[in-house]
Every structure is written in structure tokens, then in C-alpha cells.
Image (cartoon, rainbow, N blue to C red):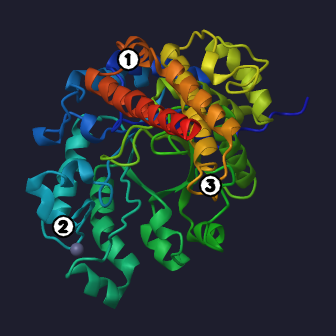
Amino acid sequence: MTPVPPPPFHDRLVHLDLKGAPPTIDYLLSFMDTAASAGATGFLVEWEDSFPWSDRDLRSPTAYTEDEVRSFLDKASRLGLEIVPLLQTFGHLEFVLKHPRFRRLREKPEFLMDLCPLHDDSSPLVLRLVDDLCRLHPGISRIHLGGDEVWSLASCEKCAPFAGEHGRSALYLHHMEPVFRHVRSLGLVPMVWDDMMRKWPPAELRRMDGVQLVVWRYGVDIEAGLPDGMWDRFADSGLDLLAASAFKGAIACDEVWADVPRYARNHLSWLRRAARTSFSGIVLTGWSRYNHTTCLCETLPAAVPSLVTCLDLLLHGGSVEDAWARSAPLLGLPPEHLPGSPQMPTASLPEASFPGSALWRVSGRLAAARSARWHAVDGIKHHLPEYNGGRRNLYEWLRGAENAQKALDILLSADADIRSAASGILHDPDIEELIQAKVVMERREAAAAKARAEEAVAG
Ligand SMILES: [Zn+2]
């Protein structure tokens, strides 16, 4: 008998982005069972403002309590799942820097994401946050320190000349090295996202010895757009590499639907890379907001079929269809057809058995409404007489009006559907935010498209 090779990614961490529509603790606990059954080995938990920080200003009104955090960690321990907390320590620190009392620590006064690395109070703030996070995470072995997308790096009057003299990488490390040392003094292995280092030479990368580098790519071709030689430089650095794929939240910042084939193809691309580069693990990211101030992406329950299928692919390989056929029974769904296919249209998804599946079905209807509205807007705007030399196309305008009406019909009960499906799963403010962003705005745009089509028909 031929021995079955081990999966290419030993650790399979599911990212919980809790800065957008964080689920109730009850839902989170049931979600952990689903993820564990599907092959997850742990969670990367981006608590952000959902954590019960000692500094109460940093907590959202629906932040988890300390007891809830403990129940999450206890359950992970019972399931044998690793927990890796994630704390942004440089860029994307808007949940801290948005507060007026921390404004002085921004790299640019008007940009609320990045910390100034040369401000005397920046490093002490970050170390305090690390300690506060670790206080409630006994027994962890590593911590993710973020460190990605520090877009305004080297902008302020102190940092610009520093970077000019020593280089941007030196400025980056000037801030991060004390954090790495602190984390190591707590017995933890630090992890960071890789994007700031993609052009660094191996000698500079080696200054991060002992840090795990998490290489994130979310497209269907993960190689597209990477700097030449990046993989060789990362390999030469000797750093422990992890991959980061996506099972949700990587298509558009206002997405409503987690498209299974699209996310599965991202994982297939990672499997091809893993045949050439060694990774100790993979993080399956599931973005809920692109940053603290943008609108919500699709919800976590709406992405469970995507997550389960992607985990299956990582474990067993094969095609998207193979992975779906193996995953569907776990979800209580028919294995013959992929969600979103003509045989399983998003507008009328079947009942399923996984926790939160009602929200998945609603998200399918929202996707169908959005698609109808897009078709309406496209059909109308490309045939408007003011832009086409005054030519009339009654057929396109009537079709546009029909598509807009189709969107409005689908959205008719969507507010109530979301409230019902999300009850007990999401918190009330997040449910209302979802309704405003995904239903009210969509309805307004569909109504405007319909009115424009009718105006063209009448004219
Ligand atoms: Zn600065």
C-alpha cells in the first residue's frame, strides 16, 4: 500500500477577524466544533476592540467578557486546538489611534492607522497591550504582532530623516525588534505578516531570526504581483514561513457572499506553491472588515461552506468539485452541485445543517439581489441617450427596469430575514449595521436604477 503523504501545511489556523460583526460567544463555541471537524488545528484570533482590554476605552460596547474569553480558550483546549492571539503593533492600529488621547502617537495626524515608531510613548503602549492580551491567554506558545501595511511609514518629521539615513527597513525594525524581544521574554514566538519585507535582502530578513513570517496572498493566482525573487529571498533568510490564504473577505470590502470556487482556487494556488517552498503552516484568513472604519464584509456564518471546502482541499487536494463533494455532507448540503452554480443558485439555497446556515442562505439572496442590480445599472448606463449620441434602445431600458425590480423583490423581506437569521449569532448593533449596508443601501440603488430606466423609457 502506498503511504499517504502528510498534508503540506502541518498547522491550519483559522483566522477570526473579530473587528467586524464578532459573533456571540455561543455561536463562536459551536463554530469551533465545525472548524475542528473540518481539519483546523487552531485559531488566529484578531480580537481588536472585541477584547476586554484593561483600558476600557479600547473595548467596543459588545466586547467579550473575561469569562467569555476563558470559555473560548477552555473549549479550544478541550478540542486540542491552538490559540494564537493577534495584536497589531505598528500599522492598522486604528482601534487605538482613533481615540483622541492617542492621536499624538500617529505617524500622520490625519491618518489613524499607523503608529509613529520614534515617538517615546509608542513602544511602551505596544508592550502594555501585549501584556494585557497575554494576561488572558495562559498557555499560548506564539503571538501574531501584525506589522502589515504600515502605509505612512517614515512620514513624520522624526521618521523621514531616520529612514533617509538608515533605510526604511531599519526604521521598521527599530520599532519591531523591542516588541520581538519582549514577546520572547514571555516565552512566546512572534509572528508577523510579510508584506513590508517582500523586497528586503536576506541579510535584513535575518535580523528577524526566530520570527515566523506569514506570507499572505488571497487571489486565485498567488504568484501574481509579487516582487521578483521574493520566494528565494525568503528561503535564503532561513525564517520559518507560514502561508496565509483566504476563505472570506478577500474579494471586496462590502462583499455579501463567500464564493466557494473562488476561495478554493486560492487554496489550490497555495498548494502549488507548497510543492516548491516549505511552509510550517497556513492561516486561513477570514476578513470581516478591511480596517476598523470600513463597512462589513460577509459574515462568518455565511462563509462556513467556503471554510470547510478550503480546509478539505488543504488536507486531501484534488479539484474544487472533489473537495465540495467531500465537504457537503458535513454541512448538510447536496454534494452534486456547488453553491452559486446554476443548479444551486444563490437566490434559492437549500436548507443546511451547519450552525448559522440561515444567515448563509440570506447572504445568497443578497448576492442575487446585488447581481440583478448590477445588471440593471450596466444595461441602463451603457445605453443612456446622453452618452450614446441620442440613440434609443427601449429593450435595454425595459430589461434594466426588470432587473432593478428583481433586486427590489428579493430585498423585500431581507431586513426581517437578516434579523431572524442572525438572532443569537450576532449582536444587535452589528445586525443593524448589516441591514443598513447590505439591504437599505442596495434597495436605494436598485430603486434609483429603476427610476432612471423608466425615465429613459418615458423620454
Ligand atoms: Zn514618526
**Nearer the observer, disc 3 or disc 2?**
3
Read off the residue under disc 3: 390
Q: Is residue 362 left or right of residue 154?
A: right
Q: Is residue 213 left or right of residue 337?
A: left
Residue drawn 67% across and 43% down?
A: 267
Residue drawn 46% across and 45% down?
A: 253
Look at label 1 and name its amino acid. Answer: Ile
Read off the residue under disc 2: 109
309 to 279, vertically: above or below? above
Pointer 1 local density, CA inside 10 Å: few below 14, some 14–19, many at least 20: many
Mark 3 or 1 closer to N-term? 3
Mark 2 or 1 closer to N-term? 2
Q: Which quarter of the figure has residue 152?
A: bottom left
- Label 3, secondary structure: give it: loop
Of 191 and 376, nearer the camera is 376
Quadrant of picture, ligand 1:
bottom left
Q: Residue 425, labelled with which disc?
A: 1
In the picture as drawn, the residue positioned furthest to the bottom comes out as 165
- Label 1, secondary structure: give it: loop
- Label 2, secondary structure: give it: loop
213 to 205, vertically: above or below? above
Q: Which quarter of the figure has residue 346?
A: top right
Whether residues under marks 2 and 1 lie with C-beta atoms below 8 angstroms apart, the answer is no
In the picture as drawn, the residue positioned furthest to the front comes out as 459
